Image: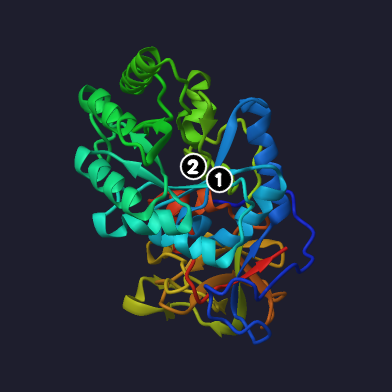
Amino acid sequence: MSGFRHEPQPSVTLVSASKDQNFAAAPNGPNLSEALISLDNLRHNLACIRAITGPQCRIMGIVKANAYGHGAAQVTATLETEGVRDFGVANIHEAIELRQEHRMQPDSRLLAFASPLVEHIALYLQHGVEMTVCDHDTVRAAQAIAAADGGRLRVQVKVDTGMGRLGVTPEEATELLELIEASPNLELTGIYTHFAESDKPEGFTARQRERFLAVTGAYEERTGKTVTKHAANSGAIVSMPDARFDMVRPGILLYGCHPDDAAPSPVPVRPVMQFQARVIFVKALPAGASVSYNRTWSAPDPTRIATVSAGYADGFHRTLSNKTRICIGGKSFPQVGTVTMDQTMVNLGNDDSVKVGDTAVLFGWSGPTAGQQAIAAGTISYELLCSVSRRVRRIFV
């Protein structure tokens, strides 16, 4: 990586540094690593998605994994102010956590994607969470539990059209849907699927779309009802206009990265997170001196080294060792030596402008993007965002 590009920089006005109770850093104490979360950039990204999906298409904000590390409660609240009323989390645990941290709007809906354990079904009723169903046994158990409670449980059917992870097969979907129709305490609120290669709209992905539409079409023809259909994640939102259906499920696009880090989409999203730390030590090294564990880098010439207060325990991957760059004071410097648990070293060369206390941008709008760092690390931006750990203080700006 030879450099980085500056993204539009949000106004850094502190909104909240203490609301997010998920993170242990003291609200007013010292912090040596932090993640700035730009809610303005989140709003911008939502507007970009709406511009291509149109006003009739609902948007489900994907806030699983603590909103990809950004803070699920704050992200959900912000999206609600922009009119979003559908939200997706990974499982009932995340749903309950979000309900406890944020009082959602009365008309907001929350779907948990994981197929539930029977012993957890009552929690969906208790907390008003829509449940994914993929098999007959879960439907029967859900009907019995909802009937005993005297309530009505909202469910969505996941169809496995080729992802091979969760879902009823297309061949078995009709029978499952009929069972739900015959269950008086269950309400079907949607049918959905997930693309395995959403950035490749032809071939296998096109066949997934056809299988899905065959299921939903048969249901609507048989019952005379319409049902909310959704399939498009961020990749499909960009590459498959004919798969947007009634609702789309943006995740990575909302957070300002692209579905394919190596081929940015035409959607002009902006990074929502800036991961940064502080310079805590600067020293001069003679030529030949080595840096960090296993002596993976040695100075070819006399140089200055800055030690930065974040390592792999904070979410700056060890696989980035000797492969990337970090921005300090608006300048890009190569990272050198093995990234350690708590610190990372940067080669300043003969630059003497960097001082102890300076901010070092690991990725974000003022440095390398998460996508650029992901390519260097041999992973994807999703993983880098989710890796920013709980000891990194989130600051909403």
Residue 307: x percent and y percent? Answer: 54, 79
Callout 2: 10 Å neighbours few (<14), some, many (20+)? some
Residue 323's image quarter?
bottom left
Indicate whether 98 appears above or below 284: above
> What SS does tag 2 mark?
loop
The answer to whether the residues at label 1 and label 2 have Cβ atoms under 8 Å apart is yes
Q: Nearer the viewer, residue 310 or 106?
A: 106
Q: Of the residues shown, which amino acid type is indicated by label 2?
A: Asp
Which residue position is annotated with label 2?
261
Residue 59 or 190: which is nearer the viewer?
Answer: 190
Q: Residue at x 71, y 67 (%)?
A: 329
Q: Quadrant of residue 174?
A: top left
Residue under pointer 1 = 257
* Residue 314 picture location, percent across and down: 47, 72
On screen, residue 375 above or below 26: above
Looking at the image, which is closer to me, 393 or 327? 393
Relative placement, left or right, of 359 versus 347 is right
Look at label 1 and name its amino acid: Cys
Looking at the image, is mark 1 or mark 2 nearer the viewer? 1
Which numbered circle lies on residue 358?
none
